[in-house]
Each structure stands twice: as structure tokens, then as C-alpha cells.
Image: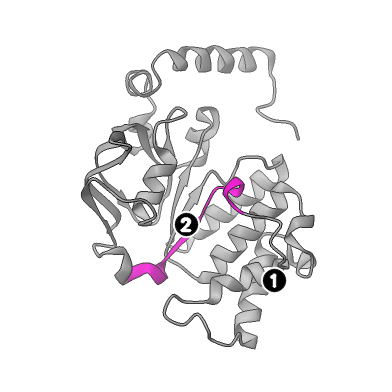
Amino acid sequence: MISIETHNLTVSYNRRPVLWNIDFELPTGKIIGIIGPNGSGKTTLLKAIMGLVPTSSGYVKIFNQDLEDVRSRVSYVPQRESVDWDFPASVMDIVLMGRYKKNNLFKRITKADRDIAAEALEKVNMLEFSNRQISQLSGGQQQRVFIARSLAQGADLYIMDEPFVGVDAATEEAILNLLHDMKNQGKTVVVVHHDLQTAKDFFDWIVLLNTRMVAAGPKEEIFNKKLLQEAYGGKLNVLSQVGDLMKEKAFNVREK
């Protein structure tokens, strides 16, 4: 089964294409990484899939339907930097937002809703912070709360924009373990990721993007020098040199 299909998808800002003629089909039940250099259109692609930016041409299908018909099955986690974390809300308030549906925004929160939210917080190791104001959390903790909100929604498709940015190693590992649990439950997870060094370890399937789609497929088919060079150009040489140096000196990818 196909989770997301795009055909001839083009998005322009001020008549300048930032995504050009994107065609792909993504499978269900996989952890899928969207990777490419800075400015390649990764975040714009997610926003186009979610209907948050106007498209110049093409279409998006989710589970072979229009987004509006399956919106309750789709959960979106935006970049942490795009959220106003000074908004006066507790951790539990934020997670409970995942229990509201578009056609029932004024429903009363039930005990079952609170139990589901608490379970989601427990999965991201944030239950003890339920009453904490979100502004008082670290960046990694805030990211976990947003993922918990997404889990509380009970979706089938999770779309996440750079969930690993600005988090410590423990949070990174916790998020990755959670993604694998979701996959084992038959969920599909699509993640924009900026780190080419870790992408091969994190994902089953890769979309390689640089304004246009360079390639999409199982990671074993995508991670080769020809396709990566096509996407990253001269930047790939620098990344390779850094990777070789880290391997030679036995440096950690990040601090523990």
C-alpha cells in the first residue's frame, strides 16, 4: 500500500520554483527520511503534503485519497523553531490537543482522552512533567512533548520536520526507539533530516531531494556516490572529508 503519492508537484515562491515536478510513491510501514542540502525544499515538501503552502501544479494523495478525507489519520510535527513556546500552556494541555478533531474542536476532554495523553507522555519519558509550563522545558523536552501530542492523535501516518535538531543524545535515542516502535505497529513515519552521516542508520527508505527529486527508494539503492553527488554536488566532498576524519580519529558523531 502507498502512504503518500505526489505527481508533478511544483511549489513556487515569488515565481521561483522551490520544488520542481516532484514524483514519488512512499510505502506504508516504513521509516522514511527526506534528505538533501540546505535550501533543497525539504520543509516545503512537507508543507505541500499537509496543504500548508499553495502548489503551482500537481497533486498529493495520502492513502490514495485527498488529505481532507484522511486528515484524522495524519499527524504533523513542525520544526520546533516554528512554535511559540512562550504560549501559556502546560505539557498536558499541549498533548491533549492531539485528541481534538477538526470537526469537533469544542468536544469535552474525557478521562479516556487524559489516559491516552498520559500514555503518550510516558512513551517519551515526559509524564512527570505533565503540569510543567512548556516554556520551562529544554529544547529536547519540548520536542518530546510535540511528539507525544502526535502520538495522542492515534494517526497512521506521522510527518515530522527535523525532530532530531537541537536534542541531546539521550533524546535522539529515545525518539529513534519510538519511531521503530511505531513502525512495528504498522505506522508510517516520514522525517525531514539534515544529517547525511546518520541518515543511513536512521531510515529504511530515502527521498533524496534538491529542488527536484533526485531519487527515492530503499536506502541500499539510494546511498551511492553517484546519487549523493547529484544531490549534494561539491558539498558532498566536504561531508565525505569530515566523515573520513571522524572515522579515522574515532570521534563520536555527537556528545553523549
In the image, taking residue 13 as reference, residue 248 lies left or right, namely right
- Which badge, 1 or 2, is on the more N-terminal residue? 1
Q: Residue at x 68, y 13 (%)?
A: 249
Q: How is the image coloured?
A: one colour
Q: Which residue is mark 1?
A: 92
Residues under numbered marks 1 and 2 in contact, where contact means CB atoms less than 8 Å apart: no
The residue sitting at 32% across, 64% down in the picture is 67
Examine the rendered structure and indicate whether residue 157 appears above or below residue 21: below
165 is higher (above) or lower (below) than 184: above
Residues 226 and 193: in front is: 193
At horizontal 30% and vertical 71% (from top left) the residue drawn is 69
Task: Give the SS element for disc 1.
Answer: helix
In the rendered image, residue 12, in percent from the top left (x then y), is placed at: 30, 39
Q: Nearer the viewer, residue 212 or 105?
A: 105
Q: Which residue is mark 2?
A: 183
Q: Quadrant of residue 35?
A: top left
Above/below status of 18 relative to 63:
above
Callout 2 secondary element: helix
| Outermost residue, front side | 14
Q: Quadrant of residue 108?
A: bottom right
What type is the residue that disc 1 sits on?
A: Met
Q: How many marks?
A: 2
Tell me where the magenta segment starts and ends, as one range. Answer: 70-83
C-alpha gap between disc 1 and disc 2:
25 Å
Q: How many other residues sit within 10 Å of disc 2, few (<14), some (14-19) or many (≥20)?
A: some
* Residue 195 image offset from top left, x and y in percent: 54, 31
| Camera sees residue 198 | yes
Residue 32 percent across, percent down from the top left:
42, 46
Residue 204 showing in the rendered view: no
Place of residue 1 in the rendered image (x, y in percent of width and height, measured from the top left) = 27, 59
